[in-house]
Image (tube, helix red, strand yellow):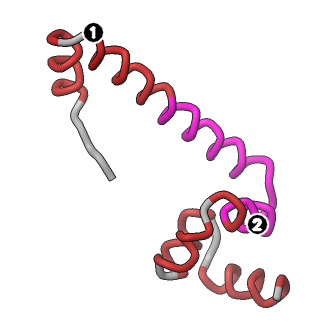
Amino acid sequence: MLRITKADADADAKTSLTQKDYTIKLFQQVQEAYLERVDDLANLTAEQRYLKLIRQSPAIIKNFPLKYIASWLGIKPESLSRIRKEIS
């Protein structure tokens, strides 16, 4: 994951219009992803969030421990285990 401070992004944006456009686009994408996550947490069931994660990012399921996936989904690891068992 790439991390850049706002101060560094602002400094880069001042030196290059291309960098400025890229920075704006990047921040818009991050904001959209955040708003989608908030909406999902508010409106989808835990099972729906898990199925969406599988559909959109199947590599995450294979490469991250279930406790981190459960945390991302806003549920306890035990609940994730139950959901996985019901789906299988």
**Looking at the picture, which amino acid does disc 2 mark?**
Leu
What residue is rendered at 76% in x and 66% in y?
51
Q: Does residue 48 appear to the left or right of 1 in the view shown?
A: right
User: Which numbered disc flags the more N-terminal residue, 2 or 1?
Assistant: 1
Residue 85 vertical position relative to residue 12 in the rendered view, above or below: below
Residue 74 vertical position relative to residue 2 in the rendered view, above or below: below
Q: Which mark is residue 51?
A: 2
> Which of these two is toward me, 78 or 55?
55
Q: Mark 1 points at which residue?
A: 17
Q: What's drawn in magenta, residue-wise? A: 29-53
> Which of these two is toward me, 20 or 70?
20
**Looking at the picture, which amino acid does disc 1 mark?**
Leu
What residue is rendered at 36% in x and 23% in y?
22
Q: Position of residue 16 (x, y in %)?
A: 20, 12
How many other residues sit within 10 Å of disc 2, few (<14), some (14-19) or many (≥20)?
Answer: some
What residue is rendered at 68% in x and 80% in y?
80
Q: Position of residue 46 (x, y in %)?
A: 75, 66
- What element does badge 1 sit on? helix
> Which of these two is toward me, 70 or 25?
25
